[in-house]
Image: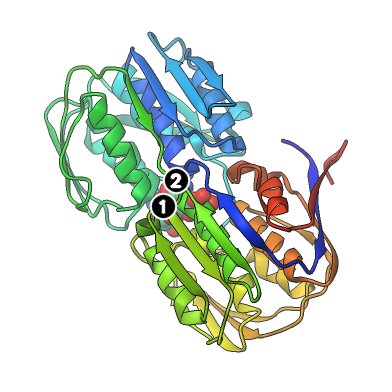
Amino acid sequence: MIPAEILISGPRTLAGTLFVSGAKNAALPELAAACLCAGELTLANLPAVEDVRVMMAALQRIGARVELDAAAHDVRINLPAVTSSEVPAEIVQTSRASILLLGPLLARTGHGRVCLPGGCPIGDRKVNLHLAGLRQMGAIIREDEGYIEATTKGLRGTEFDFPIKTVTGTENLIMAAVLAEGTTILRNCALEPEIGDLIRLLRGMGALISDEGSDVLEITGVSRLTGSCHRIIPDRIEAGTFAIAGALPGNDLLIENAEPEHLASLLDLLRAVGASVRLDGPRIGVRGTGPWHPVEVETAPFPGFPTDLQAQLTTLLTQVPGKSRVRETIFNDRFRHIAELRRLGAAIEVDGDTATITGATPLRGSVLTTTDLRASAALVLGGLIAEGETVIRNAYQLFRGYEGLAGKLQNVGGAITIRMLENAR
Ligand code: EPU
C-alpha cells in the first residue's frame, strides 16, 4: 500500500484535453484469462493502476512470466504451467482480483484456492452466485479461514440463471465455461462493456461464445485455448469522471480516446443538468454552461447509470441549484463520500438508499479521508471547486483505479499535488 495524501488548492477552472487510459475493470478479468492458456497473451492499452499491478503479482505467484512494457502500456503473459493454484491474502488483500482467478484456475487445473476478495468498502460484496454457478458446473467448494477452495475432476456445461446481475460473477462463469465439457447457458448476464471486451478476447483465444450483446450467453467448451493479442477498451468510468469534471460550472474539457456509446446514460444526464455535450468519434467535449436543472437519478446495471459514477455525480450536483436526488441501488453502503462532501460545505441528506442534494452551495477546503476509489475521485472534484486548501487522506485508494489522475488534471489547470508519506495515517 502506498501511503499518500492529495493536496488541492481551489477553486480551479479546468480547460483543455484529457486522455483516457485503458479500462481497469476490463484489464482485471482479461489478465485472469491468461490462466486459461499455455500460449502468450498480449494485452495492449493496459492501465497503470494499483489493482492491475496486484493482479499481475497474483499471476506471477501462480507461475506466470509477466513482461510489462510500462511506457507502451503493454503486457505479455506466459503461463506454460500453473505452479501453484493458491492466491494468498498478502498478494490480493486490497483488490478483488483474487475471485476472478477462481474460475480460470479451476478450468485449467481442477483446483483453485483464493482469499476472499477485498476491494472497496461499499457494502456487501457477495460472491455466492460465482460459487453457485461453479458448483453447478461440478466444482466442490469449501470456505475456510478467509479462503475459498474449489476442486473439480472436470467442469461440465450447465444452465445457470443469475437471480441478479453480477459483473465479475458473469466474467468468472464465462471463463470457467470456455474450457468445460459441453455447453453452458448463462441467463440474466450483466451487460457491462467490460464483459463484451472479455468475450472478444476469449474468442480471439479460440473460445466459442455467442453474441456478447445479449444477456443470455451460450458457451461451448473447447479442449484448449491459444495465446492472443488484444487491445483493452477505454475506461468508461475514468472518461465519465472527466465528463463530470467538464460539466462543473465554468469548465470546458475535451476527453480523448473515449467510447461515448459506453457513457450514454451519463451524457444524457449531463445534458439534462445543463452541461453542453458534443460528440466527435472517440472525443467527448463537455462544458459547464448551464442553465442548470436539478435531476433525479438511480444507479442501475449497464446500460443504466453506473454506480461507479454516483459519487462523482453527487459532487457536481452540489453546484446545481435546487434539490437533486440520487438513489444507489447496486451497493448498500456506497454513500461514504457524503460525510466528507459535507465537511466541504455541501448540503446533502441521506435517507436509506437515497441522497438529496440541495444546491448550489459554496464549498470550502477541508481535511478529508477517503474510503474507496470512486469516492476519492468525488472528493478530488470537490477539492477543485472548494475555496482554499483541501487535503485528502488515504489517497492510496485513488491509485487503485485512476492512472496519473493528478498529472492529468494538472495539465488542464487543476492545482493538485500528491504528498507521499513515510507512514500511513
Ligand atoms: N452480488 C451478490 N452475489 C454475488 C455477486 C454479486 O449478491 O455472487 C451483489 C453484490 O453484493 C452487489 C451487486 O450484486 O450488491 C452487484 O455486484 P457485482 O458482482 O456486479 O459487482 P462486482 O463484480 O464485485 C464490479 C466492478 C465494480 C462495480 C460493480 C458494479 C470489477 C472488478 N468491479 O464489481 O467496480 O462497482 O461491478 O458495476 O469489475 C470500481 O471500479 O470502483 C468498482 C467497485
Of 256 and 407, which appears nearest the observer? Answer: 256
Q: Foreground: 262 or 110?
A: 262
Q: Position of residue 386 (x, y in %)?
A: 78, 71
Q: Residues within 10 Å of mark 2 (few under 14, many from 20)?
A: many
Going from N to C along the chain, the mark reached first, 1 or 2, is 2
Q: Nearer the viewer, residue 243 or 48?
A: 243
For the point 30% across and 53% down, which residue is it? 191
Q: Amino acid at mark 1?
A: Pro
* Residue 384 visible from this viewpoint: yes
Q: Position of residue 410 (x, y in %)?
A: 73, 52
> Can you identify the residue that label 2 sits on?
234
Q: Is residue 205 above or below residue 360?
A: above
Q: Residue at x 79, y 72 (%)?
A: 343
Quarter of the image containing the N terminus? top right
The colour scheme is rainbow
User: Could you tell me the amino acid type at mark 2?
Assistant: Pro
Please name the residue that numbered disc 1 is placed on. Answer: 282
